[in-house]
Amino acid sequence: MTQRRFAALALGAAVALTTFTALTTRAASAAVSVVDDAGRTVTLAAPARRVISLSPHGTELIYAAGGGARLVGTVSYSDYPSAARRVPRIGDALVLDLERIAALKPDLIVVWWQGNAQPQIDRLRDLHIPLFFSAPRRLDDVATSLTRLGVLFDTPDTAQAAAADFRRDVAQLRARYAGRPPVSVFYEAWDRPLMTLNGESMISDVITLCGGRNIFAGLKPLVPTVSTEAVLAADPDAIVTSAQGATASDQPLPALESWRAWPMLTAVRRGNLFAIDGDLLTRPAPRIAQGAAQLCKDLDQARARDAGMNR
């Protein structure tokens, strides 16, 4: 090879490398933009590299979307996946350490819309750090959240794959259970005072997915207080609650056991008192598909008991 030919090849390689580096740098610094669950457009000058999550479900979404390595701060109870337990804590859903947040120099904060305290959110705005408001209300919102975060992290392949897996799991449950005989359901969100969730909640969407009917779907607000008399009058086929570590229907929680004081209630008479692990049912993140699968099995058990009583 002549010296001139070698020099030409070397120059060509150098130009190609320079072009590639420029394109890579430009891609890494390109602005990204999505619409969050509050309907706000969130624009970052470059994909997020230092992220803070202000809710356990937000933390799960961030990891599933491929941004876990960029998480520099989160709140109490952010315990999934296991790597999240090693992330520094900056408070809880209601009280945040704003000085610590500022010191971590995040370029994106994933806020729990209507879950984090409003005064805290107002003070976060004063820090002029981009905020992404997360509040999935329907099952497909989980998949949408994943793809949006994937845009903000520049991890579209990971996020889209996670969204596709979640949609597949939900579609399989819908195909299997949604057309089965309806089961009326009272979801007990809290026992003192007695509270439930209306039809705009994610859990109500899960109940519908399983072929159930939320007896208080039409109430306002999102978390309405109800009376024992109202539950007795509605006479649900099943009563469901959630709690840390609960394992389905064989050992109902003490809060559900109190319903046995009304043996005439259909759910009590047929033994349809179900408790499900709250981490799987109340966090609007990919694992809610597992909670939905458990609830669907429980409501199918209620159908079987109903059929047995009517023989």
Image (spheres, rainbow, N blue to C red):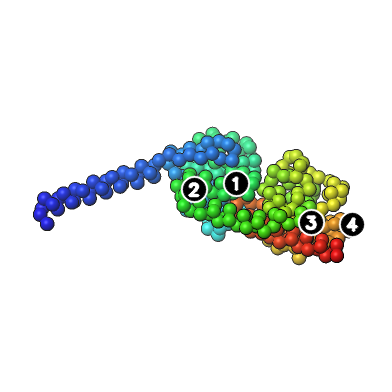
Dot 4 or dot 2, earlier in sequence: 2
- The amino acid on which the numbered mark 1 sits, given as a three-letter code, is Asp
- The amino acid on which the numbered mark 2 sits, given as a three-letter code, is Gly
Q: Residue at x 87, y 48 (%)?
A: 233
For the residues marked 4 and 2, what is the alpha-carbon distance in whole angstroms? Answer: 51 Å
Element type at marker 4?
Answer: loop
**Left or right of residue 163, residue 203 in this image:** right
In this view, 27 is above or below 86: above
For the residues marked 4 and 3, what is the alpha-carbon distance in whole angstroms? Answer: 13 Å
Mark count: 4
Dot 1 or dot 4, earlier in sequence: 1
Instruction: Please state which of residues 229 and 164 is positioned toward the viewer in this rendering.
Output: 164
Which residue is the site of mark 1?
A: 141
- The amino acid on which the numbered mark 4 sits, given as a three-letter code, is Met
Q: Residue at x 84, y 49 (%)?
A: 234
The reply to whether callout 1 and callout 3 are in contact (CB within 8 Å) is no
- The tag on residue 150 is 2
Dot 2 or dot 3, earlier in sequence: 2
Dot 2 or dot 1, earlier in sequence: 1
**Residue 219 placement (x, y as % from top left):** 77, 41
The answer to whether residue 292 shows anywhere in this view is: yes
**Residue 5 placement (x, y as % from top left):** 13, 52
Density class for disc 1 (Cα within 10 Å; few <14, some 14-19, many ≥20) is some
For the residues marked 1 and 3, what is the alpha-carbon distance in whole angstroms? Answer: 26 Å
- The tag on residue 132 is none
- The amino acid on which the numbered mark 3 sits, given as a three-letter code, is Ala
Q: Residue at x 23, y 46 (%)?
A: 15
For the residues marked 1 and 4, what is the alpha-carbon distance in whole angstroms? Answer: 39 Å
Which residue is the site of mark 3?
A: 238
Which residue is the site of mark 4?
A: 264
Dot 1 or dot 3, earlier in sequence: 1
Dot 4 or dot 3, earlier in sequence: 3
